[in-house]
Amino acid sequence: MKFEIQCTRHAARRARLYCEHGLVDTPAFMPVGTYGAVKGMQPSILEALGTQIILANTFHLMLRPGAKLIEAQGGLHGFMQWRRPILTDSGGFQIFSLGALRTITEEGVHFRSPLTGESIFLTPEISVEVQKQLQSDIVMVLDDCTPYPASEKVVRQSMALSLRWAKRCHCAHQAGGSQAALFGIVQGGMYEKERQASLEGLLNIGFDGYAMGGLSVGEPKDLMFEVLEKTLPLLPAHHPRYLMGVGTPSDIARAVALGADLFDCVLPTRHARNGHLFTSEGVVRIRNAVHKNAKRPLDERCACSTCQHYSRAYLHHLDRCKDPLGVVLNTLHNLHTYQTLMKDLQRHIEHGTLSSFVKDIF
């Protein structure tokens, strides 16, 4: 992997990330393909929307259909017929979400499969091996994601465990001979001191990129950005910076201004399935009765095929009928909105007009 910064405007960066399966212009948004598919979207449609990289979930894919099966199909690229880069998460956040169904030890995590109930043991080494079988371009270390709120003592212990796991992931990655990039994850909750200790430990190990984890887990948004403002500038300038699990268009724009390069979030696809659509006028709830007879497009300023060909009344009708086409058209629009946002952010960084653009979004 190679990361080249094209230009900077204050903290914001316009860069290019070269992966085994192609180029990614940053700042970039990664649609979430939980089971090796972005729900309702063929790879050709994702490419047409301007998607250059997607995220797939290691945890879910190792449970179904299994990493060995995917490896035998030519890896995740061959399995899902996606030709561009893929980032796989480590499974840490999904395990965090299991709550009482999992037990964390020094060696790894014991948990019950939410699908079959069988007992499963995931270690840093197994996480790296599974991601190697998936043949992703970017591999994430296994980490322990701390909840919010949590005491500083609890956060410190969790962060230290994540560091030890990061070291084991690094050793396993090197021993396995993988050509994929390996990203470390900065933890430390909402405590500046612990965030700095986490980053220092990761820098001592050495990674190809660095992610901000443990955010957007229920904390107030102002607190999240306080953490970002203090921590993002400390991340290595010549490595990609990945803000995990964030967020709304305004969150992404604000984080880009602070220096983040990569983003993923389920919001555009999940909201599409629930009839919540991002437009230049704000979020439109298409199932509301006010749209029943509306002839106007969803967003008159949007160039996506949904807005070019269909009325709000039709989208409302599909949603009320629970027709799968409605989900497809909604998802296409939301992802187009996100990818257009990233292109606009790139352009405004190049032209030196990012600050005014971010203000306009708010």
Image: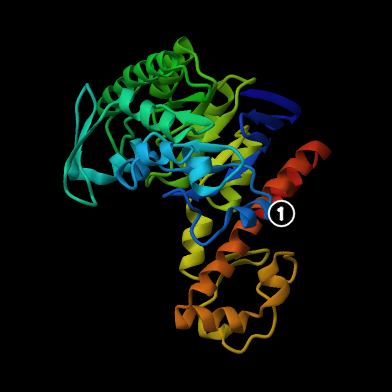
- Asked whether, in this view, residue 188 is left or right of residue 112, the answer is right
Q: Which residue, given by chain and number where applicable, does mark 1 sit on?
A: 360
Quarter of the picture holding the N terminus: top right
Secondary structure type for disc 1: helix
What residue is at 52 percent from the left and 30 percent from the top?
Answer: 138
Percent across and percent down for residue 37 are 48, 52
Percent across and percent down for residue 160 are 31, 19
- Asked whether, in this view, residue 42 is left or right of residue 50, the answer is left
What residue is at 39 percent from the left and 14 percent from the top?
Answer: 171
Percent across and percent down for residue 306 are 66, 70
Q: Residue furthest top?
A: 204
Label 1 amino acid? Answer: Asp
> Residue 132 sits in which quadrant?
top left
| Mark 1 neighbour density, 10 Å: few (under 14) some (14–19) many (20 or more) | few
- Frontmost residue, 166 versus 305: 305
Percent across and percent down for residue 263 are 55, 41
